[in-house]
Image (spheres, grey):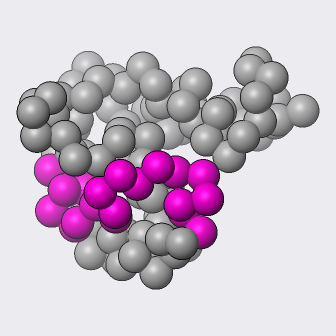
Amino acid sequence: MPTDCSPTALLETHFGTLPDPRAAHSIDHKLIDIIVITICGTICGGDDWEAIAEYGGTKQDWLKTFLELPNGIPSPDTLSIYYHETKNEGRSQDQTSQGWLGRQLSEGCS
């Protein structure tokens, strides 16, 4: 287990192995930013890409305290495209998210 318990350290450790099918020349948002905004937005009741992006916009100042957000909050289309593209990869986002949640519940951050 990593000793760094920064807000994104455990997420980066677990989600860092996710494939990133985006073309390198068209990447405007860091993958960890997309993942964290999606997780937080979903926990706070976002049930579609519009709501998750709206959550990100509303909480942008707070999110900037631990995310880089070099180009601001990803649009609903950006979120949708990323998750649509990863859906067909060998390891699904759902499996990765479930694994991360299970690990946090059993080990925590100490």
Q: Is residue 61 above or below residue 65?
A: below
Task: Give the residue drawn at x 35%, y 39%.
Answer: 31
> Which of the two residues, 51 or 78, is positioned nearer the viewer here?
78
User: Looking at the image, which residue is at 29% across and 24% down?
Assistant: 19
- In percent of width and height, residue 37 lies at 45, 58
Residue 107 is covered by the magenta coloring = no
* Residue sitting nearer the eye, 104 or 82: 82
Does any portion of residue 56 appear in the rendered image?
yes
Please state, as top left, top right, bottom left or bottom right, where the C terminus lies in the image. Answer: top right
Residue 25 screen position, x and y as percent = 9, 33
Residue 28 x %, y %: 22, 47
Does residue 101 appear to the left or right of 24 in the view shown? right
8 horizontally vs 30: left or right: right
- Corner quadrant of residue 79: bottom left
Residue 62: name its quadrant: bottom right
Q: Is 57 placed left or right of 99 in the picture?
A: left
Q: Quadrant of residue 55?
A: bottom left
User: Which residue ends up furthest to the front in the rendered image?
Assistant: 70
Give the overall secondary structure of the magenta segment. Answer: loop
Q: Residue at x 42, y 20 (%)?
A: 17
Q: Is residue 67 magenta?
A: yes
Q: Is residue 57 above or below residue 13?
A: below
Give the x, y percent position of residue 1. 76, 18
72 up-or-down from 33: above or below: below
Q: How many marks?
A: 0
Q: Is residue 58 above or below residue 44?
A: below
Q: Is residue 63 left or right of residue 54?
A: right
| Residue at the extreme right | 110
Q: Is residue 48 visible?
A: no
Looking at the rendering, the stretch of residues picked out in magenta corresponds to: 62-81
